[in-house]
Structures are given as structure tokens and as C-alpha cells.
Amino acid sequence: MHRGDIVAIAGRGDFSAKPRPALVVQSDLFNEDHPAVTVCPITSHATGDSFYRVPVPSGGQTGLVRDSEVEIDRVQAIWRQRVGQKIGRAPDEVMFAVDAALRRWLEI
């Protein structure tokens, strides 16, 4: 698993009880050994709010069935065992936009 991978995560908690795609945003320095993984969920319910949501296209590279948005406002750490298979990978331009949105959301 690497930063930028789109993976399936087991849903649980306040925002989703179903399996869903998520974008790995944690540094690769920690992805091999840390027991948790930091992700941003991905939703197909688009809001169009580009301040804290980043559009991600459907298709072969991403593995998504529908055009979707990365939910920067729902960044979370999940236990590694809740991460399922890799679905695809975010394009570089999506990761640049995710980085900018995370800096805004976290004010760093």
C-alpha cells in the first residue's frame, strides 16, 4: 500500500456503515509498519465544494465506477486490518489538489 492508492475500507462509525473507497494520504515512510493508515474517504455524492472536496475521475487508473470526490473534511486514521484490496491509483493532479486541500483543512 502506498500514498495515492485508492483502496477499499470496511465502513464503520458516524459517516458510513458500508464498505467504500478511500485515498491513502499517509506518507510511505509509515505505510509498511504502522498499525493504522490515514485515509480520506471517497464519495460519489458530489458537492462541488472545491475548498475541501477534490474531484477524482472514474476509469481504469482510479478503478472507480463513478466520478467522485475525495472527502478531505473526513480525513481519518483506520486500523490496517480494515483496509481491503487496492482499487486503483489517484492521478498526480488529484494528489496535488489533495495536498493543497489538506493544508487548507488542517491549516498547515
Image (cartoon, rainbow, N blue to C red):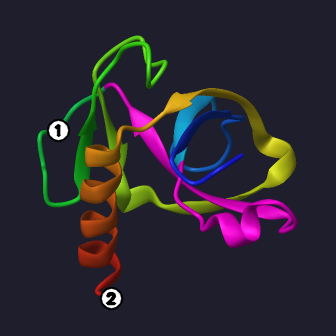
In this figure, which residue is indicated by the disc labeled 1?
47
Q: Secondary structure at mark 2?
A: loop
Question: Would you say residue 62 sits in the magenta stretch?
Answer: no
Q: Nearer the viewer, residue 106 or 31?
A: 31
What residue appears at the point 59 percent right and 64 percent down from the top-left corner? 26
- Cα–Cα span, label 2 and label 1: 24 Å
Q: Nearer the viewer, residue 58 or 81?
A: 58
Does residue 16 appear anywhere in the picture? no
Query: What's the mark number on residue 99?
Result: none
Quarter of the figure that contains the C terminus:
bottom left
Q: Position of residue 97 (x, y in %)?
A: 24, 56
Q: Position of residue 21 (x, y in %)?
A: 54, 32
Question: Would you say residue 32 sits in the magenta stretch?
Answer: yes
- Give the residue at the far front of this rendering: 92
Q: Position of residue 99 (x, y in %)?
A: 33, 65
Q: Nearer the viewer, residue 51 or 30?
A: 30
Instruction: In the rendered view, tell whether residue 59 sits above or below residue 79.
Output: above
Instruction: In the rendered view, tell whether residue 3 sits above or below residue 8.
Output: below
